[in-house]
Image: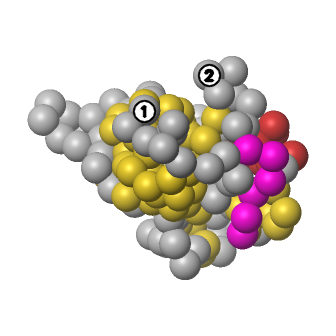
Amino acid sequence: MSRKVGRGIRKFTPRIARGLPVGAKILCTDNSGAKELRIITVFGYKGKLRKLGKAGIGDKVNVSVTKGKQDLRKQVLQAVIVRQRKPYRRPDGTWMQFEDNAAVLIKPGGEPQGSELRGPMAREVTLRWPRVSAIASKIV
């Protein structure tokens, strides 16, 4: 027995490959005083039971500062992922990949803590975080 299923119009939303699991150490690319961050949780990640959450470009994560200024260390802060080493595909068919994994510290409202961003930043971040993209020097 077979039945026909209507296909309809599907809205295309780009799915970025998530390459940073919980516990990953990443660089902090702003001038807030933090040097290295460790991912604690990923906001909005819905996965299976007992499976580690993963973050990709543009995701908001909870992080702890492992290297940097003494007043920032061992604090739980929020950050946005701006670069990842795992390749991901853009809607136009091109593949993107960066040399390192990096994030920018943000305040709870979405305002960046630093005043400048070192290195390139993915274009996908500019759509979700316009305030973070305002401090970027190079958008790829």
Mark 1 crowd level (few <14, some 14–19, many ≥20, 10 Å Cα)? few
Residue 112 forms part of the magenta stretch: no
Q: Magenta region: which residues?
A: 114-119
Give the camera-side residue of 98 and 37: 37
Q: Label 1: which residue?
A: 75
Label 1 is placed on what type of residue? Answer: Gln
What secondary structure is found at the residue carrying circle 2?
loop
Q: Secondary structure at mark 1?
A: loop
Left or right of residue 111: residue 20: left
Name of the residue lying farthest toward the top? 109
- Nearer the observer, 42 or 23: 23
Asked whether the viewer can see residue 4, the reply is no
Which residue lies at the image location 42% right of the left edge and 32% below the top edge?
A: 75
Q: Earlier in the sequence, mark 1 or mark 2?
A: 1
Task: In this rendered view, identify the residue nearer to me: 91 or 126.
Answer: 126
The x, y position of residue 57, in whole percent, is: 56, 53
Residue depicted at 62% across the width and 22% down the height = 108
Q: Which image quadrant: the N terminus?
A: top left
Quadrant hosting residue 53 = top left
Residue type pointed to by label 2: Pro
- Is residue 44 in view? yes
- Residue 18 image point, x, y percent: 42, 54
Q: Which residue is mark 2?
A: 108
